[in-house]
Amino acid sequence: MQLTGAEIVIECLKEQGVDTVFGYPGGTILNVYDALYKHQDEIFHVLTSHEQGAAHAADGYARATGKVGVCMATSGPGATNLVTGIATAYMDSVPMVAITANVVLPLLGKDTFQEVDIAGVTMPITKHGYIVKDVKQLAKTIRRAFEIAQSGRPGPVIVDITKDVTAAVCEYTKETPKKPEKPAKYSQKDIDKAIAAIKESKRPYIYLGGGAIASGADKEVTEFARRIDAPVCDTLMGKGAFDGNSERYTGMIGMHGTKTSNFGVSECDLLIALGARFSDRVVGNAKKFASKAKVLHIDIDAAEIDKNIKTYASIVGDLKEILSKINASLEEQHHDEWMNHIKELKEKYPLTYNKDKLSCPYIMEEIYRITKGEAIITTDVGQHQMWAAQYYHYTKPRTFLSSGGLGTMGYGLGACIGAKMGQPDKICINIAGDGCFRMNMNELATASRYGIPIIQVIINNHVLGMVRQWQTLFYDHRYSQTVLDDKVDFQKVAEGLGCEAITVSTKEEVAPAIEKAISLKKPVVINCLIDKDDSVFPMVPAGAPISDAFDEDDLKKQKA
């Protein structure tokens, strides 16, 4: 059938099973929005308050559902406003397709009004970028974009379409989407070497990253941990890939990881990295990381092997597939002495906080108790992010959504909206510091416009908490530009943007506020006032070995 380019865009989205898109219209993309208007019963469009919010919402939708998230923007500033969200998705391997429109082909490259080479701008932060200048290539390009976004290591793809292409007409034939590629670059020899290393190990440790969630390998990971009788730690991105209530689970590893995970990995003789990339926030001092261990690294991206940490053995391919093969071939191992030692570490070094006052750890524990661990938690970046990772027990994949690689302040609210659109039956709660909340709090207007029942919890200490913590520890209390004492009233802001608002200043007020927010089934902001000097512990100084993890008690001993 003969369709315009704009209609082809919509038909291709329908082919891919897209039911929700996030975006903001403008001049060059008007034809696409006009076509979308005619299909609004099939594809729901969420008009965000800012294009960055659209990108984060598409990201949150993708993380919560496992599908490809889709966002749209017009040319120039509309497209560039997507950049931070695209970079966030790229760093955390999130499948996303960003569709932008550009000026007409004859005006391309002439500094035309609202013209930007967005494919060029985003080249370093996308898996691939397209500029479509011929309507006959449009359907093929969009289909390929979705294929690339999902195949191998997932990530964002941008499709920029000149406005005249969206108006041009050509023949369109519907196609069934191809299944995403999961290239296997390993051999049986790789599997055998890994199994041999596991059998030889007396003190194995499993280190989980986001790849375990992307591959849908949570059941295989659980069976693998049982079969090799090993403790399990995770990264920020790996949360939920393994049951956070399991006796084997020792908590997060790295800069704000538990002492058990950091000390245990430093003592193990075989570190098994599953879908993880050995980030600097995990590794600390690379030369001293897991120095007693052989490293077995399983990852879908060959570029990650030996990039940050040298391996003894590696397997490149889909984690779910590889673990299935290993589990089928490996007899049960037993490491009673090692597991008892890890148990002793857990008992000796539990996570602790001051229970005499209102704090974020207490709030997270109450959220966990009230939601029975069934909520989707999104976060921004900073102290609240670490507390949310430490004190809420994630038992299922795709329930903790956070900007791990890029560390994007302002990520959480848009992501929470996207997650709720993708998982409408789930309670979706965003945890944000007051500094982060200021970044994109305009997206409350998006939530209220559509009546999206998200809960925004502000951990309000009137400072940029994590930066202030560093200033306290390493900059002799010089609080340069980190104090946020001003006249901003978040309760009035929330109400002005059409949301319910509750302010909490005592522990006793927390549970009623959460219960009320859930029962209202509308967007609610809970403004929680905590102490400005609350700090996240344990902590490892930047560049130090993770075995140097310290907590508040250690600091007191140093001062004594």
Image (cartoon, rainbow, N blue to C red):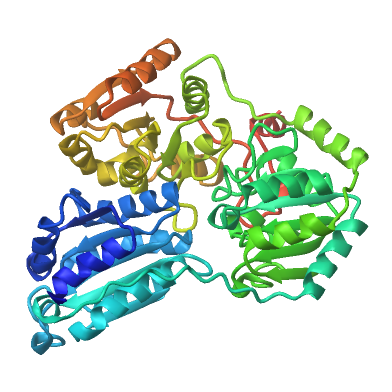
Image location of residue 457, percent across then percent down: 36, 30
Q: Nearer the viewer, residue 419 or 16?
A: 16
Image location of residue 505, percent across then percent down: 37, 17
Which image quadrant: the C terminus? top right
Establish if 363 lies above or below 22. above
Q: Is residue 24 left or right of residue 214?
A: left
Image location of residue 394, percent across then percent down: 56, 36
Q: Residue furthest top?
A: 508
Establish if 47 lies above or below 347. below
Q: Is residue 421 visible?
A: yes
Residue under the image location 8 percent in, 65 percent down: 30
Q: Is residue 127 left or right of residue 134?
A: right
Q: Nearer the viewer, residue 361 or 48?
A: 48
| Residue 158 lies in quadrant | bottom left
Establish if 365 lies above or below 29. above
Q: Residue furthest front?
A: 1
Which image quadrant: the N terminus? bottom left
Image location of residue 122, percent across then percent down: 33, 73
Establish if 131 lies above or below 257. below
How many marks overall? 0
Residue under the image location 31 percent in, 79 percent down: 140
Residue under the image location 71 percent in, 54 percent down: 545
Q: Is residue 230 visible?
A: no
